[in-house]
Amino acid sequence: MLVKGIVPRGYCKGVVLAIEIAKKQAHQTAPVYILGMIVHNQYIVNALEDLGIQTIDFKGKTRLELLDEINEGKVIITAHGASQKVFDKAKEKGLEVIDASCLDVIKTHDLIQDKLNEGYEILYIGKKGHPEAEGAISIDEKRIHLITNIDDLKTIDPTKKYVMTNQTTMSLYDVYELCEFAKNTLPYVEIAKETCTATKIRQEAIKNIDDDIDIVFIVGDPHSHNTQKLASIAGENKDVYMIESIQDLNITNLK
């Protein structure tokens, strides 16, 4: 049996940097918290907790609501970024804020704010409830519209002017489809795709795997949006399994 490693693979630079920033806070005298999962991977979360860094994450709660669980010490903003309201609330509570936001996410936030200042409304392609989408939309909840599918675009007022952008970890193929639909139905829309390079080249690598590959194993947390998207792309013409560790590798699937 021939086993091939798809290249590139592994964490993007934003996540690697966020983990390194967090590790530097190990074994502090003051409590250190991460606002939400630093990356959707339980092994990383557990490893950081072994260093005395506690993850605060409750399903359905926003970053702003999660801050209610923290009353002292330091709080780390994850690579997903957060709205200015989160930074302001943390400082009001007397917390020391350590910002590990991905530079690509910050770039998208800056683009959104600039375009809002110019009088545009924003069409933001993202996943409902995802922390990155939450942070972006909370910049201006009245003028930023979450787009999850084509039906969402059908409800948009065609007389207004828009800039369309996206969550950096979205599938570039989903983003393309939605952007093309918007261009054909909204006369005053500008497109500013913001899929991060790491996401893009990993998705393209999955899309272009050799024809003789029978099975693809995606190693990652099955709750991760990135993991799910890679599995979805590979699943178009391959057998796909999402696994977190070698313990999840079912040898029967290979026989």
Image: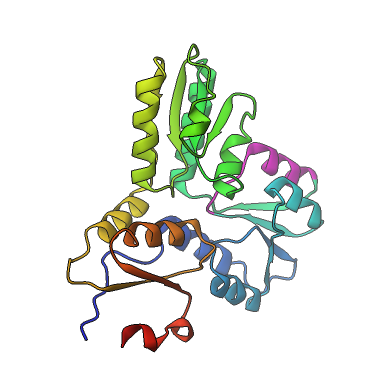
Quadrant in the picture for the C terminus: bottom left
Mainly helix, strand or loop, the magenta region?
Answer: helix
Magenta region includes residue 17: no
Is residue 110 shown to the viewer in this render? Answer: no
Count the numbered circles shown.
0
* Boundaries of the magenta span: 79-92
Q: In this view, does 31 lie above or below 168?
A: below
Q: Is residue 156 left or right of residue 212?
A: right
Magenta region includes residue 84: yes
The residue under the point 48% across, 50% down is: 102
Q: In this view, does 170 lie above or below 230?
A: above
- Provide residue 53's location: percent of width, then percent of height: 66, 69
Q: In this view, does 90 lie above or below 144?
A: below
Q: Is residue 189 left or right of residue 77?
A: left
Q: Is residue 56 above or below residue 153?
A: below
Quadrant in the picture for the N terminus: bottom left
Q: Which colour scheme is used?
A: rainbow
- Provide residue 165's location: percent of width, then percent of height: 44, 33
Along the line of sight, the residue nearer the viewer: 4 or 76: 4
Along the line of sight, the residue nearer the viewer: 86 or 1: 1
> Residue 32 appears in which quarter of the rendering?
bottom right
Along the line of sight, the residue nearer the viewer: 83 or 161: 161
- Provide residue 27's location: percent of width, then percent of height: 67, 74
- Provide residue 58's location: percent of width, then percent of height: 72, 59
> Residue 181 appears in which quarter of the rendering?
top left
Q: In this view, does 233 lie to the left or right of 35?
A: left
The residue under the point 56% across, 30% down is: 145
The residue under the point 69% across, 48% down is: 62
Is residue 14 shown to the viewer in this render? Answer: yes
Q: Is residue 154 left or right of residue 76?
A: left
